[in-house]
Image: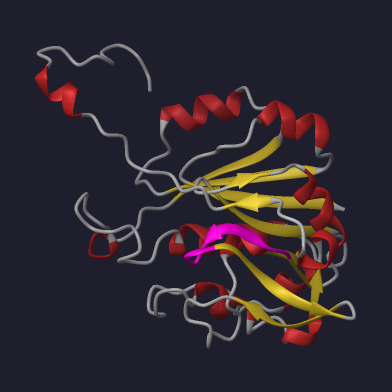
Amino acid sequence: MTIIIWFVLAVEASATEMYVFVPNIHWILVEDSINKTKLVSKFLAHCPLSNTHLNIPTPPDYKTTEKDPNWLKPRGVLQRNLGLKWLREHLNMSEVKGVVYFGDDDNTYDLELFEEMRYTKKVSVWPVALVGGLMVERPIVKSGKVVGWNTLWKADRPFPIDMAGFAVNATLLLKHQEAGFSLKVPRGYQESHLLKRLVKMEDLEPKANNCTKILVWHTRTEPPKLKQEQKLKIPSNQGIEV
């Protein structure tokens, strides 16, 4: 089964490793940008994986500033929706056999995760480490079924799960054209906004040894600290693409 995965802004995983160890994968990379950047375009030109490069900017009113905490405003909403739009325009429901996963440059992945999600029938789930103020947030599984959630942050959410903690069968997304993300939902509810249009809790498929194994970590991507750069008359990266 093909795995369709898109990353917002940037890519952390090694393209060579993904190509060697994860067969049948298609990357959709969506930049939060008015134009596609040369940096990402050049990367994809040398990428051995099948890929699609898209771009759409976040509206100015929803952009955070350098002083804002990264959680203040929703991130990646329009980018993920553009990926869904591309998916629905290019995949044929009668032919597609694939799984969709929302990757991000905030995470670190064990390649085993991509093999785990390959057999998703509706929505598969697994633990995510270093998120929600806990060492591990995870579904609670009994007799092979998800019965609750090991989480403390906004535990009353319909699906108190991180974006890195689930994958969706592509056919399900094609059947439910209304399923997507929104700039208007409260913080932490993007996942629930999507999933409640696709499944109920009893439909969830626990992976990673009944949700007891860690295969993804929310390691976060922080803006670089470049205080010394301000002291230079000539930028240190002049003529060099960074």
Q: Position of residue 54 (x, y in %)?
A: 51, 46
Q: In front: 207, or 60?
A: 207
The way the protein has been coloured in the rendering is secondary structure
Q: Position of residue 134 (x, y in %)?
A: 53, 64
| Residue 125 found in image quarter | bottom right
| Vertical side of 85 occupied by 176: above or below | below
Q: Position of residue 223 (x, y in %)?
A: 32, 41
For the C terminus, the image quarter is top left
Residue beneath the point at 82% across and 73% down: 205
Left or right relative to 76: residue 7? right
Is residue 133 covered in magenta?
A: yes
Q: Which residues are magenta?
A: 126-134
Residue beneath the point at 22% across and 49% down: 66
Is residue 10 covered in magenta?
A: no
Q: In front: 106, or 240?
A: 106
Residue beneath the point at 84% across and 39% down: 23
Q: In front: 94, or 119?
A: 119
Asked if residue 48 can be seen in this view, the reply is no
Asked if residue 38 can be seen in this view, the reply is yes
